[in-house]
Amino acid sequence: MAKSQQTFNKSEKEKKRLKKREDKRKKMEARKLEKEEGGSEGIQFAYVDYNGNLTDTPPDPSMKVKVDAESIEVSIPKRDDSDVEEFDPVRKGKVSFFDTSKGFGFIIDSENQEKYFCHVSGLIDEIQENDKVSFELEKGMKGMNAVRVKIVE
């Protein structure tokens, strides 16, 4: 005798699919009935109150605020020299793991203790575990990668 091709998992998926279809049909019928009963298509006019929320009642005209069009800036604000802080792209850290046969490892940043991936293609000097290094960060496929890695004494 041949074994049935219908497995428990297949039948459960079929039941879920049919139930979903039935729920969708019921919701559609309920929306049709609600539309026929109410007769309206929702809010005809929408107003924005002083908090930025949509309402169906018009705002109070006494709370209206006049804004001078020239006072609105539509650009990036200019930076002062005091706002600019020196950003050094070169970071320092310690090699926590490096496998020379596979060609990758991880470096722990000394400032924020973050772990960064390091590939052999991003190395300037040969590195080993527990070496103190300087490196730069570059966006990789799965996060930030350490590149231009040099040993620091």
Image (cartoon, rainbow, N blue to C red):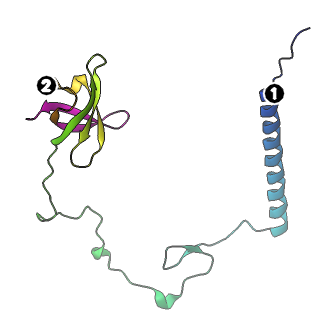
Name the residue at the top extreme.
1
Residue 108: % across, % down = 26, 39
Q: Nearer the viewer, residue 101 or 42?
A: 101
Sequence order check: which comes first, mark 1 or mark 2?
1
Quadrant, the N terminus: top right
Element marked by disc 2: loop
Q: Report which quarter residue 121 is drawn in.
A: top left
Residue 125, numbered circle: 2
Q: CA distance from mark 1 to mark 2?
A: 58 Å
Q: Position of residue 72 (x, y in %)?
A: 30, 72
- The residue at the far left in this view is 153
Provide residue 116's location: percent of width, then percent of height: 29, 37
Name above or below for residue 57 compared with residue 87.
below
Report the residue at 88% width, 9% height from top: 2
Amino acid type assigned to the residue bearing label 1 in the image:
Phe
- State the residue in front, 47 or 10: 10
| The magenta segment | 134-153
Number of numbered discs overlaid on the protein picture: 2
Residue tagged 1? 8
Determine whether 113 is above or below 60 in the image: above
Q: Nearer the viewer, residue 102 or 69?
A: 102
Magenta-drawn stretch, dominant element (helix, strand or loop): strand
- The residue nearer to you, when weighing 125 against 64, is 125
